[in-house]
Image (cartoon, helix red, strand yellow):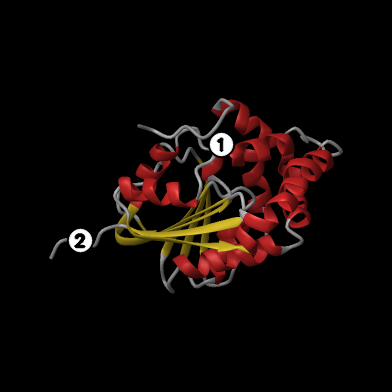
Amino acid sequence: MSVQTGSLAPDEVRRMFDRIAPVYDAMNHSMTVGLDRRWRRLTAEAAVEPGNRVLDACCGTGDLTLACARAGAREVVGLDFSERMLERARGKTQVPGCSLEWVQGDVLSMPFEEASFDAATVGFGVRNVENLDGSLRELRRVLRPGGRLAILEITRPRGALAPFYRLWFDGLIPLAGRLLRGGAAYTYLPASVRRFPGPEELCNSLLLRGFETVTYRLLAGGIVALHLAQTPEAAP
């Protein structure tokens, strides 16, 4: 059975991200006290090996795309369905020694050939896709045998940190978002996290879609999960 993660239609999600594109980076850095930069760097370093051709799916304004370039990729393709987000990405500083390409497209039907990337990353993106299983199938399709996938996503912590997380994420962030253009997105954000599978369930989804050596680690006390997986090696 397919996992449906979004409560909004795809066109509504696209319009929402078009609206918040001008404040997206500032809100990310503010919400995480700048930790999102470190999380993206860890994601890129976990997936990318020097000389790789890398896909950054649901790339948004391109911060993870650029982190993959800095991790040693020779080429990185950033794909997103929001043209306003891609406009922001295109305006960012290039990374010497790495070719960057920005493509508008849907992670559920990507315009790439099979086995065309050595590695793929998704940062804070699969939670907004209408069909999680469909996106995992597409990511597996475009990865070569033995290709690596890294998914960075918000999750809900357990234990002592949980009450503080609820106050911050379910209360303060939507309140701050109301003061900004497109602030309704920051009401959608906590709801989308509640609907998204937990770390163990996402591991199972990756295994069911044919990935191997699936692992995850929790960051910042369990606020964020970094999942790593690999496609099967080619038969000898």
Circle 1 sits on which residue?
Answer: 195
- The amino acid on which the numbered mark 1 sits, given as a three-letter code, is Arg
Where residue 204 appears, x then y in whole percent?
A: 37, 48
Which residue is rendered at x = 63% and y = 58% of the image?
A: 63
Tell me the crowding category of disc 1: few under 14, some 14 to 19, or many 20 or more residues within 10 angstroms, Cα based.
few
Marks 2/1: CA–CA distance: 35 Å
Circle 2 sits on which residue?
Answer: 234
Answer whether residue 93 is visible to the viewer in this image: no
Which residue is rendered at x = 68% and y = 57% of the image?
A: 160
Q: Is residue 108 left or right of residue 33?
A: left
Mark 2 vs mark 1: in front: 1
Q: Nearer the viewer, residue 191 or 21?
A: 191
Contact? badges 2 and 1 (CB < 8 Å):
no
Q: Nearer the viewer, residue 199 or 87?
A: 199
Answer whether residue 128 is visible to the viewer in this image: yes
- The amino acid on which the numbered mark 2 sits, given as a three-letter code, is Ala
